Image: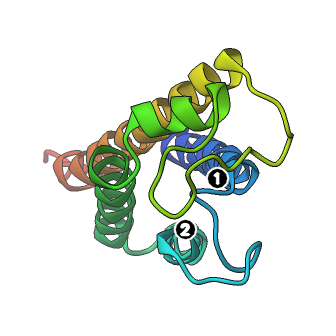
Amino acid sequence: MKPNLSLKLLLLSVIISVIHHIDHVLRIDHSGWPFLPRVTPFTFSLLAYPIFLLIFLAQAKPWYRVAGTAVLFLFATLAHIFFEPMRDKFHTWAYRSNLPGHVGEQNMLGFNSEFLGVCSIVIAVLLSLALLATLLSFIADVSRGSDNKEAPPVR
């Protein structure tokens, strides 16, 4: 079976999510277990991957796909608005962490880069956009499945 647009968008979302989590780990101030010896919101954000897997496996349950993708979209987007604003991402890469408990910490690469700060922001925005596109595509799939039933043959 050839993957449809929704599954391709879901795979793109997974790839962007992995890149985004790598960014978290490299910034240290927004990382946590299993990369640091403390449980943080980052640790719980790794629950996205079992949810991604369930969405991939829920082929027979299209509304589960919609619900799972909606949860991921809302979680990622709200986390980046309220818990990890774009200015924090940029500041940690461009200078050093200014977050309480991490003030002055350097990223794991050991250098400052405004370019990497911008990349961090772009990756977070792309993640939300990819999840939104995936969500809308799954909703369209459900709509087509229920609205495009074949009409009975005319006699």
Q: Amino acid at mark 1?
A: His
Q: Residue at x 55, y 66 (%)?
A: 52
Residue at position x 53%, y 31% from top?
Answer: 91
* Quarter-of-image position of residue 57: bottom right
The residue identified by callout 1 is 24
* Badge 1 vs badge 2, beta-carbon distance below 8 Å: yes
* Cα distance between the residues tagged 1 and 2: 8 Å
x and y percent of residue 88 in the render? 46, 39
Q: Amino acid at mark 2?
A: Phe
Residue indicated by mark 2: 42
* SS class, disc 2: helix
Left or right of residue 81: residue 154:
left
- Image location of residue 151, percent across then percent down: 18, 49
Q: Residue furthest top?
A: 115
- The quadrant in which the N terminus is found is bottom right
Residue 67 appears in the figure: yes
Foreground residue among 121 and 107: 107
Residue 132 x/y as whole percent? 35, 40
Q: Residue furthest front?
A: 104
Query: Label 2 neighbourhood size at 10 Å, few (<14), some (14-19), many (20+)?
Result: some
In this rendering, would 70 be left or right of 110?
left
The residue positioned 68% from the left and 48% from the top of the image is 27
